[in-house]
């Protein structure tokens, strides 16, 4: 499964089960809850806005890094994750964090 197919699978599942909505941010595909973006697809990775207590742990995982939509413009609350096996659980965590 390609990265985009995996993203679309997660987005559709969350749309049906968690009332999330698809959208776009910075020209990238994103998923929103209550009009707040909690996850996006950017350059074959998923990017998540995570609760502070999980942010550093996820950032310490192999391959993850702070989201940088443009060189030198890091978004410190957002973590970019290349490992597709982590995407679904992180999307749920991020959704719960922003659905409050």
Image (cartoon, grey):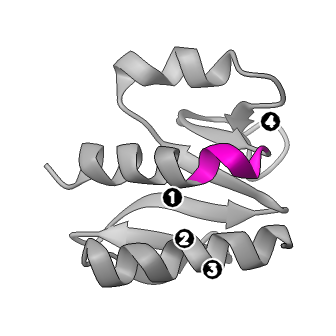
Q: Which mark is residue 10?
A: 2
Residue 81 location (% of width, % of height)? 71, 42
Question: To which residue does mark 1 refer?
Answer: 39
Query: Counting other residues with Cα less than 10 Å from the Cα at mark 3, is it few (<14), some (14-19), or many (20 or more)?
Result: some
- How far is disc 2 from disc 4 in space, using C-alphas? 29 Å
The mark that comes first in sequence, 4 or 3, is 3
Residue 96 location (% of width, % of height)? 26, 48
- How far is disc 3 from disc 2 in space, using C-alphas? 5 Å
Q: Which mark is residue 8?
A: 3
Q: Nearer the viewer, mark 4 or mark 1?
A: 1
Residue 82 location (% of width, % of height)? 79, 45
- The residue at 39%/73% (across/down) is 14
- Horizontal arrangement in the rendering, residue 44 relative to residue 95 (left or right): right
Q: Taking 64 as reference, is 52 above or below it? A: above
- Horizontal arrangement in the rendering, residue 66 relative to residue 39 (left or right): right
Query: Counting other residues with Cα less than 10 Å from the Cα at mark 1, is it few (<14), some (14-19), or many (20 or more)?
Result: many
- Circle 1 — which element? strand
Q: Which mark is residue 72?
A: 4
- How far is disc 4 from disc 3 in space, using C-alphas? 29 Å
Residue 93 figure quarter: top left
> Does 54 lie within the magenta span?
no
Of the 4 image quadrants, the one containing the N terminus is bottom right
**Cβ atoms at labels 2 and 1 below 8 Å apart:** yes
Q: Which residues are magenta?
A: 83-87
- How far is disc 3 from disc 1 in space, using C-alphas? 12 Å
**Viewer-closest of 43 and 7:** 7
- Circle 3 — which element? helix
């Amino acid at each position: 499964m390609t990265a985009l197919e995996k993203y679309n699978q997660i987005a559709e599942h969350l749309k049906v089960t968690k009332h999330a909505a698809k959208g776009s941010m910075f020209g990238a595909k994103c998923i929103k809850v209550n009009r707040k973006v909690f996850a996006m697809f950017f350059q074959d990775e998923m990017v998540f806005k995570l609760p502070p207590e999980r942010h550093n742990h996820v950032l310490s995982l192999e391959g993850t890094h702070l989201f940088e939509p443009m060189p030198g413009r890091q978004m410190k609350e957002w973590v970019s994750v290349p490992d597709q096996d982590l995407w679904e659980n992180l999307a749920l965590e991020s959704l719960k964090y922003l659905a409050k």
